[in-house]
């Protein structure tokens, strides 16, 4: 029977540390870090995510700036807002909630955000820094996954690490972070010939494909660390992961639940990136 990794408690501890570090920054410099969140359109799930991000900002002591734009917003209008925020010395982080309504070019938006304020770590410049292993900003969800792995005390070095999913947001950067810690990394995807054969080799298994219950207990190596990034809403409205929790927990050594595993970590890491962005900008004399 696996040990359940309590992402909620680990995220709360990280937010507490950020809160203390932020209070020190404010006390020593008089500057308060600020995160600007842009929500275009009225997707209800996105509205919930954005509200949670705002709340987390307030809790750790940041200024939270919210921009709600109608679904009919033009690319030029969105570009103009990003340009204004890029130029605003009192803004440290800019986050455009994805997905964007049809008609808006996501890639163009990600390229427009100044890399130093790109707290999602989605800009190709920052993605490149992740590959080089030397960036100020880290991809939020993959970094949260690393924190959860660290919490188990299991070292990544020399381990077989299998990432299921190759998205730009999770799978690809996740593989880089595992590699940075000397894991032997395999990335699986929809064209992988025999998924179970690969996942069964994993000492550390990260599932990030968005298919409910794809990973079952028989696909897991006994004692493995299993991190479930999936958030799938079932017909009954309940959230489930990419891992079939009931069968997996009988085999794994450590496992994250959904909800309460990776989810809370993403926001904690977003707060960490915002603080790091503010500190880096202050060090360059840019904070106002
Ligand atoms: N939509 C779903 N997850 C994310 C995220 O991490 N960042 C942004 N900007 N949009 C998202």
Image (tube, rainbow, N blue to C red):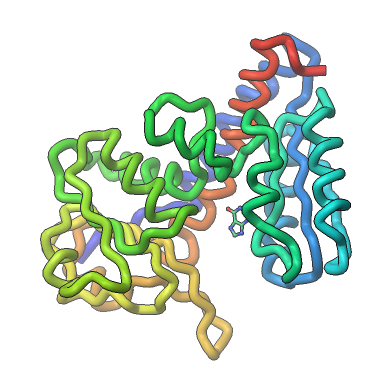
Tell me which residue sits at (40%, 78%) in the image: 212
Give residue 26's quadrant in the image: top right
Tell me which residue sits at (31%, 57%) in the image: 206
In the image, residue 31 lies at what x, y percent? 78, 18
Give residue 27's quadrant in the image: top right
How many marks are shown on the rendered structure?
0
Q: Quadrant of ligand 1?
A: bottom right
Tell me which residue sits at (74%, 33%) in the image: 62
Image: 37 above or below 18: below
In the image, residue 210 lies at what x, y percent? 44, 71
Q: Is residue 228 visible?
A: yes
Q: Quadrant of the C terminus?
A: top right
Q: Quadrant of the N terminus?
A: bottom left
Q: Is residue 151 visible?
A: no
Tell me which residue sits at (13%, 39%) in the image: 158
In the image, residue 162 lies at what x, y percent? 23, 56
Residue extending furthest toward the bottom: 235
Give residue 217's quadrant in the image: bottom left
């Amino acid at each position: 029977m696996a040990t359940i990794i309590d992402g909620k408690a680990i995220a709360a501890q990280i937010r507490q540390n950020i809160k203390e570090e932020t209070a020190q920054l404010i006390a020593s410099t008089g500057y308060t870090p600020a995160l600007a969140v842009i929500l275009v359109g009225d997707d209800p799930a996105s509205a919930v995510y954005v509200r949670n991000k705002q709340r987390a900002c307030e809790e750790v002591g940041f200024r939270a700036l919210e921009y709600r734009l109608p679904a009919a917003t033009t690319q030029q209008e969105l570009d103009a807002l990003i340009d204004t925020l890029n130029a605003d010395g009192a803004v440290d982080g800019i986050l455009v909630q994805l997905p964007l309504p049809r008609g808006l070019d996501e890639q163009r938006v990600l390229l427009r955000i100044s890399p130093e304020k790109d707290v999602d770590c989605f800009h190709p410049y920052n993605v490149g820094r992740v590959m080089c292993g030397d960036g100020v900003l880290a991809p939020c969800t993959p970094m949260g996954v690393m924190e959860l792995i660290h919490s188990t005390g299991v070292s990544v070095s020399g381990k077989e690490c299998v990432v299921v999913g190759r998205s730009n947001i999770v799978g690809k950067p996740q593989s880089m972070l595992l590699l940075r810690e000397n894991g032997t990394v395999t990335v699986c995807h929809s064209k992988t010939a025999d998924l179970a054969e690969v996942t069964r080799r994993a000492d550390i298994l990260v599932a990030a494909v968005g298919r409910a219950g794809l990973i079952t207990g028989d696909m897991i190596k006994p004692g493995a660390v299993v991190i479930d990034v999936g958030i799938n809403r079932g017909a009954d409205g309940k959230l489930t992961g990419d891992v079939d929790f009931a069968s997996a927990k009988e085999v794994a050594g450590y496992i994250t639940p959904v909800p309460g595993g990776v989810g809370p970590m993403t926001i904690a890491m977003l707060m960490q990136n915002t603080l790091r962005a503010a500190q880096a900008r202050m060090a360059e004399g840019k904070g106002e």
